[in-house]
Image (cartoon, grey):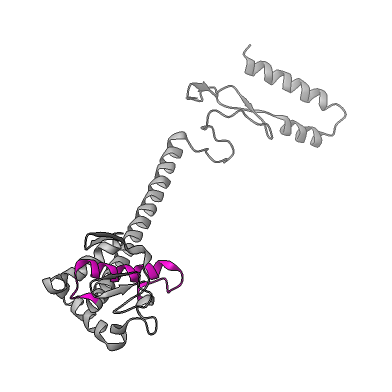
Amino acid sequence: MSFKKRFAVVMALAVAVAGVGVKPADAAERSNAASPTFIDEAAPSVSGCVVSGFAVCDGMAVPSVENIIVLQGSEVPMTSESKIALDQEKAAEEAEKEAQKIADQKKAAKKKYKKALRLLAAIVYCEAGGQCYAGRLAVAAVVMNRVKSGGYPNTIHGVLWQPYQFGPIRQGKMARELGYYDQGLYKQPERSGSLKAAKDILAGKYTVVYNGRKIDLKKYHNFNGHLSNAKIRISGHDFA
C-alpha cells in the first residue's frame, strides 16, 4: 500500500474515533477541517527538488525551495540575478549623479576663473600698464594678497570696489578697461602683458626677479607711487 493510501486510512480512522458521541454536524465540520490536501504526485521538480508528495494543510508551513516556491499568493523572493541587475542599475545612477556633480563644479570653477582674470587684467593695466612685468605682477599680487588676508573683502570684486582703495575705480578708468577686455583688446600687444600677469598670479606665481633680486610678493598688501613705510620699490610703485 502506498504512503498516500496508508495516510488516508489512518486519517479516516482518527476521524471515526473522534466522531463518537459527537453531533453529526460537528463531526462533519471537524472531518472537513482535518482533511489534508496533497500536492499532485505529478508536480514538477524545481531546481532539483521534488515537491510532490508533501501534505499541505491549513495553517501548516511548507519548507521553502530556494527562492522559488509560492504558496497562497505570497511574493516571490528576488532571485540573485534580479538583485545583481538592480544593484547595477543603482550604481549606474549614482555614477551618473556624481559625474554631473563634477561637471557642474568644473563649470562653476571655470566661470569663476574667467571673472577673476577679467578683473585682474583690467586693474593691472589701469595701475601698471606701462611698467615692466615685475611691476605688473606685483600689483596683481597685492590684490590677491588682500583677498586671502582676512582683513579685506574675500573676493576680487570686493577688494577692488572697497571705498577709497583703487583710483581707477573712482575715476571710471576701470569700467572703460573692462569694456576693452570684453572686446578682445587684451589679446593685443599693448594689454597682453597685463593679461599674462593676471594669469600668472591666478596660477600661484608669487615670486619674481627684479634688478637681479628674487622677490616674494606674498608679503605685500599696499602699493602706491610713494609710501612712507615702503619695504621695496618695483618699477613705478612702492610696496608695503
> Which secondary structure type mostly characterizes the magenta part of the structure?
helix
Residue extending farthest left:
189
Question: Where the C terminus falls, by quadrant?
Answer: bottom left
- The quarter of the picture where residue 123 lies is bottom left
Q: Against 219, is 170 above or below?
A: below
Q: Against 7, is 211 above or below?
A: below
Q: Position of residue 184 (x, y in %)?
A: 16, 74
Q: Which one is nearer the viewer's eye here, 84 or 14? A: 84
Q: Which one is nearer the viewer's eye here, 80 or 107? A: 107
Residue extending farthest top:
1
- The quarter of the picture where residue 16 lies is top right
- Residue at 21 percent across and 69 percent down: it is 195
- Residue at 74 percent across and 31 percent down: it is 31
Residue extending farthest right:
21
- Residue at 15 percent across and 75 percent down: it is 185
Q: Position of residue 50 (x, y in %)?
A: 52, 21
> What segment carries the magenta color?
128-157
Q: Which one is nearer the viewer's eye here, 67 or 192? A: 192
Q: Position of residue 81 (x, y in %)?
A: 43, 35
- Residue at 39 percent across and 50 percent down: it is 93
Question: Where the N terminus falls, by quadrant?
Answer: top right
Q: Is residue 155 part of the magenta span, yes or no?
A: yes
Q: Is residue 137 part of the magenta span, yes or no?
A: yes
